[in-house]
Amino acid sequence: MIDFDGKGFMARLRKVKDDDFGKIINDFLIDGEYVVGAYKSVRDGVVFTNKRIITINVQGLTGKKQDYTSLPYSKISAFSLETAGVFDMDAELTLHMSGVGRVKFEFTGNTDVKDICLQISKYALN
């Protein structure tokens, strides 16, 4: 899902409806902020808004404990994309963020990662 140190296991993210995280995310959104894309693994998720990326890490056996990380587009200094191939069926997005370092997301091969990069460019370069 999300890897901050390059050593963690990552479940692949798949596209879900933008409102799948509605109850959780609405409490975090500021005025004028809206969801532009939502992705989910087995339990964890990533929501792209027009202002930032919010990661949701569900912890523990019951899943009641959750960790939320807000990654503002303004902190992205560079990003790279690795698309899915014939034998490597996943796509990877790596963000280099000021104050955080490298953040890596892994998506299923059929995810439109180029659209994700277009959205990041749109909001990070303004």
Image (tube, helix red, strand yellow):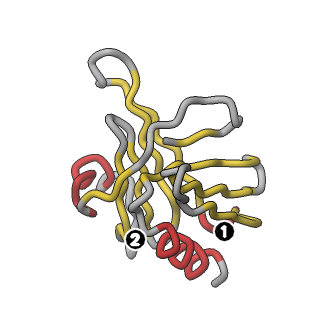
x, y percent for residue 92: 58, 54
x, y percent for residue 108: 42, 52
Amino acid on which the number 2 mark rests in the picture: Glu
- First in sequence: mark 2 or mark 1? 2
Residue 125, by quadrant, is: bottom right
Q: Is residue 40 above or below residue 5?
A: below
Q: Residues within 10 Å of mark 2 (few under 14, many from 20)?
A: few
Q: Could you tell whether 18 is left or right of 119 in the image?
A: left
Q: Could you tell whether 75 is left or right of 90 in the image?
A: right
- Identify the residue position indicated by label 1 in the image: 74
Amino acid on which the number 1 mark rests in the picture: Ser
The residue under the point 38% across, 31% down is 58
- Identify the residue position indicated by label 2 in the image: 33
Q: Is residue 41 above or below residue 60?
A: below
SS for tag 1? helix
Q: Residues within 10 Å of mark 1 (few under 14, many from 20)?
A: some
x, y percent for residue 17: 23, 61
x, y percent for residue 72: 59, 61
The residue under the point 41% across, 48% down is 13
Q: Could you tell whether 5 is left or right of 31 in the image?
A: right
Residue lying at the far top of the rendered structure: 61
